[in-house]
Image (cartoon, rainbow, N blue to C red):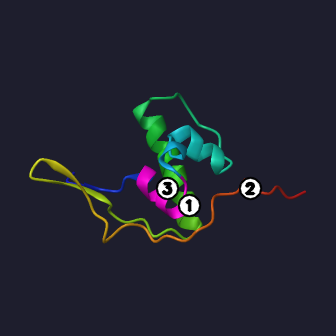
Amino acid sequence: AKRWINIRKSYGNFYKVPRNQTKLTIMLENLGMNYDGRPHSGLDDSKNIARIAIRMLQDGCDLRVNERIHGGQLMTVSSSGPLEGAPAPQMPRYRN
């Protein structure tokens, strides 16, 4: 893969939160979700990242490629970054 979506960057830009609020467990917690599975398991981490991505899409985020490799160097792709403007995630409200 030479191009990808860095979910941490997308989450931080979309919800306007600092980088220290973009760790996987913190992102899940801020979205009102629990970590499913075993921490640092590639499969479980991937499933949890997918849950975050789904929630971001539901909240109106336009997920786009935001990083790439060019000439062996990591490059940020700012022109196709996620659209900004969503409020910080809120804990879900439970209905009775």
| Range shown magenta | 8-17
Quarter of the image for residue 17 reads bottom right
Q: Say whether marks 3 and 2 touch (CB < 8 Å).
A: no
Indicate whether 49 appears above or below 45: below
Q: Residues within 10 Å of mark 2 (few under 14, many from 20)?
A: few
Indicate which disc, 3 or 2, sits on the residue closer to the N terminus.
Answer: 3
Q: Say whether marks 1 and 3 touch (CB < 8 Å).
A: yes
Residue placed under numbered mark 1 in the picture: 15
* Residue 43, disc: none
Q: Residues within 10 Å of mark 3 (few under 14, many from 20)?
A: some
Residue placed under numbered mark 3 in the picture: 12
Residue at the (59%, 67%) spot, across then down: 59
Residue positioned most to the right: 96
Does the magenta-highlighted stretch encompass residue 12?
yes
| Disc nearest the viewer among 3 and 2 | 3
Left or right, 27 with respect to 33, comes to left
Residue placed under numbered mark 2 in the picture: 92
- How far apart are the alpha carbons under marks 3 and 2? 19 Å
- Percent position (x, y) of residue 34? 65, 40
- Percent position (x, y) of residue 23? 50, 41
Residue at the (48%, 47%) spot, across then down: 19
Indicate whether 45 appears above or below 65: above
Residue at the (20%, 54%) spot, across then down: 2
- Percent position (x, y) of residue 22? 50, 46
Quarter of the image for residue 4 reads bottom left
State the residue in front, 86 or 59: 86
